[in-house]
Image (cartoon, rainbow, N blue to C red):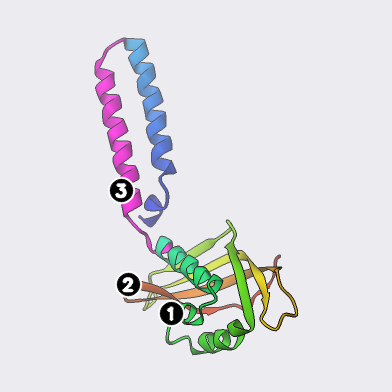
Amino acid sequence: MDVFFENSWKFLILGGLIEIGLIALLVKSGRGMWIYVMAAVALLTGGLVCLERLVVTPREQVEKALYAAAAAVESNNLNAVLDTISPTAKEMRADLRARLPNYKIDRVSIKSDLAITVNDLTAPPTARAEFHVVVTGGDRAGNFHDMSYPIFLTVYFERQGDRWLMSGYDEPHGLR
């Protein structure tokens, strides 16, 4: 059911195809009643698009959490970054506490190949996000600056209450 609400293109395309068929019927028959059917299809399509916008799927929640974490890293705010990590992810929290203060991050750019898998069968529900990211910045010691570092990441999430928090990640490696 979540796939139904992931994006509105399917509603727009289906509604558009039906409207084209109805226009053909209107032209062929010359009967004005088809205009009412066209209006109903347009309203239904618009309603489905609005519904899709209102329904936030778990995958979309994980994506939002990932972008919030990227924004926290980009702001160079360690506490904001730690707020996006599960309190049970002690290794990840310690690793980021040790690493992040050494760098000044200027930009975190998540690429369009983001793939999120949600598993509702675990307790708590978990998710995995795989994606390419380009991190731009430098070290605080001044040895390098304005460097872009492309990496492939796998980040793991777990749902805690109404939030998706990072619970771990695979050690990053260069763009593949």
Q: Which residues are magenta?
A: 30-59
Q: Residue 148 — which label?
A: none
Q: Quadrant of residue 170?
A: bottom right
The residue pinned by badge 3 equals 51
Q: Quadrant of the N terminus?
A: bottom left
- Amino acid identity at mark 2: Asp
Q: Check disc 1 and give the amino acid type.
A: Asp
Mark 1 or mark 3, which is nearer to you?
A: 1
Q: CA distance from mark 1 to mark 3?
A: 31 Å
In the rendered image, residue 101, in percent from the top left (x then y), is placed at 59, 84
Q: Which image quarter: residue 36?
A: top left
Residue 80 belongs to magenta span: no
How far apart are labels 1 and 2 at the CA level? 14 Å
Q: Which residue is mark 2?
A: 162
In the visual, does 7 lie left or right of 176? left
Q: What kind of element bears circle 3?
A: helix
Residue positioned 32% across, 43% down in the render:
48
Disc 3/disc 2 C-alpha distance (Å): 21 Å
- Residue drawn at 36 percent across, 73 percent down: 163
- Quadrant of the snapshot with the C terminus: bottom right
Badge 2 crowding class, 10 Å Cα cut-off, few under 14, some 14 to 19, many 20 or more, is few
Question: Is residue 46 left or right of 67 when viewed as pictured?
Answer: left
